[in-house]
Image (cartoon, rainbow, N blue to C red):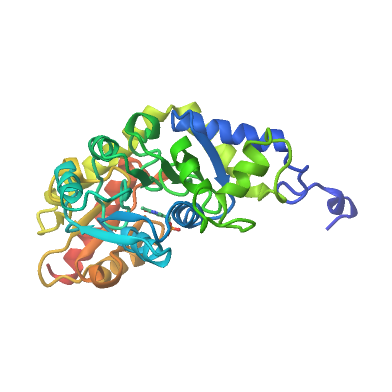
């Protein structure tokens, strides 16, 4: 090492401080990505931070929630809601399908006191996507608050909180946006703010508190940040939204839809008995495609074999009990390309041939 090298500025350590104005401009950029007029609060942690903060802020012992379960995240939301003292009606649908607006309507007919609906838009873990626009109409008719986990859908398919009547829309950058995992955002409607302000159990002076940010940041003209910003993650979020703007959101979404379509068709074309896990293409998420292994073929073992040949492929087995029968092709972000999914399918085909299937 030469003496001068000590003086060289490190590209991501020696940064000038992130200003409040820059932070606010990143919020505005995210708001444009969501086509929303609602307040967007950037939360400096993985998406579980705003997902939990939004539930703890709005739910309490007086809440009656309809919690839709189409994958593992719905289960977690139900646990948080119960923790808050809410009465929770779970609506679980099989992971190979999506929930319908008619099922939501029936739930309201059965429990008219429902005043909160939690839903996951797309589930990367199970590969399904739910018809949020139609469900939003039903939720709006009944005046309930609508909470949506759009972490796995943003960038892969339209996410339109204003048009769909979503009151709390949570996104993370680490899936189809191709960005960092350590920062996330939530758009909050006036109705949701009102519910939080009236909730004596809403977190205050807490890292989970969205109200702290409303009072001390958003309503105060976004002049002073509450604490030192997570600078690297904020810069990465800024860069990834700019990259989406440059490519064009529609192009990014088309890339994900094409990757999903090629994966579904290619899996069947392998002719080895692998099938799309989600039966209807219209209910399959563009962010990731889940596949069902043929009887007698263990998905986790098959994926391990494929990854041994190429560890860089975006392949995984399903979580928990699904590991036996579910393959996940995580074709999101930079992996949303035909070349990548074709490489995944070839590796799966070769692994199947190895096992003699
Ligand atoms: C990926 C994802 C999240 C974020 O969770 P991680 O496990 O940290 O990636 C939240 N909700 C949904 C629906 C997701 O797919």
Residue closer to the observer: 187 or 63: 63
Residue 126 appears anywhere in the view: yes
Where in the figure is residue 178, as x and y percent of width and height? 47, 44
Between 342 and 143, which is closer to the camera in this rendering?
143
Residue 213's spot in the image, x, y percent? 62, 45
Q: What quarter of the picture does the C terminus occupy?
A: bottom left
Q: Is residue 105 above or below residue 161?
A: below
Ligand 1 picture quarter: bottom left
Task: Residue 75: name its quadrant.
Answer: bottom left
Q: Is residue 189 left or right of residue 217?
A: left
Residue in view at x 29 percent, y 53 percent: 344
- Whether residue 281 sits left or right of residue 137 in the image: it is left
Residue 106 vertical placement versus 161 (above, below): below
Instruction: Name the residue at 83% across, 58% down.
Output: 1
- Whether 315 is drawn above or below 184: the answer is below
Image-quadrant location for residue 91: bottom left
Residue at the right extreme, as displayed: 3
Number of numbered discs overlaid on the protein picture: 0
Give left or right: position of 238 versus 67: right
Q: Nearer the viewer, residue 61 or 75?
A: 61
Image quarter of residue 311: bottom left
Please give the name of the residue rendered at 57% of the width and 31% of the height, measured from the top-left corner: 28
Q: Nearer the viewer, residue 180 or 95?
A: 95
Counting from the top left corner in percent of width and height, residue 76 is at 36, 63
Residue 277, given in percent of the width and then of the height, sits at: 17, 55
């Amino acid at each position: 090492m030469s003496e001068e090298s000590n003086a060289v500025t490190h590209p991501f350590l020696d940064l000038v401080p992130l200003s409040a104005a820059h932070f606010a401009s990143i919020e505005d950029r995210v708001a444009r990505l969501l086509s929303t007029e609602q307040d967007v609060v950037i939360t400096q942690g993985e998406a579980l931070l705003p997902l939990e903060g939004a539930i703890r802020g709005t739910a309490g012992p007086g809440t009656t929630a309809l919690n839709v379960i189409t994958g593992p995240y719905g289960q977690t939301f139900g646990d948080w809601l119960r923790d808050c003292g809410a009465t929770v009606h779970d609506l679980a649908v099989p992971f190979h399908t999506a929930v319908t607006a008619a099922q939501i309507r029936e739930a309201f007919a059965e429990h008219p006191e429902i005043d909160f609906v939690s839903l996951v838009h797309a589930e990367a873990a199970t590969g399904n996507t739910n018809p949020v626009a139609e469900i939003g109409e039903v939720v709006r008719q009944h005046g309930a608050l609508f909470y949506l986990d759009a972490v796995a859908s943003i960038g892969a398919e339209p996410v339109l909180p204003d048009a769909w009547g979503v009151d709390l829309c949570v996104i993370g950058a680490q899936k189809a946006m191709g960005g960092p995992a350590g920062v996330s955002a939530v758009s909050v409607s006036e109705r949701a703010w009102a519910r939080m302000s009236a909730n004596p159990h809403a977190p205050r002076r807490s890292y989970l508190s969205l109200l702290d940010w409303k009072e001390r940041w958003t309503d105060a003209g976004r002049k002073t940040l509450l604490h030192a910003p997570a600078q690297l993650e904020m810069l990465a979020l800024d860069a990834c939204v700019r990259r989406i703007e440059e490519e064009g959101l529609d192009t990014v979404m088309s890339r994900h839809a094409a990757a999903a379509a090629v994966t579904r068709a290619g899996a069947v074309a392998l002719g080895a008995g692998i099938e799309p896990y989600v039966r209807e293409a219209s209910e399959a998420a563009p962010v990731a495609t889940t596949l069902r292994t043929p009887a007698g073929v263990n998905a986790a073992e098959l994926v391990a074999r494929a990854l041994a040949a190429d560890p860089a492929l975006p392949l995984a087995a399903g979580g928990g009990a699904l590991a036996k029968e579910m393959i996940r092709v995580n074709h999101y972000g930079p992996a949303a390309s035909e070349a990548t999914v074709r490489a995944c399918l070839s590796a799966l085909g070769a692994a199947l041939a190895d096992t003699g299937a």
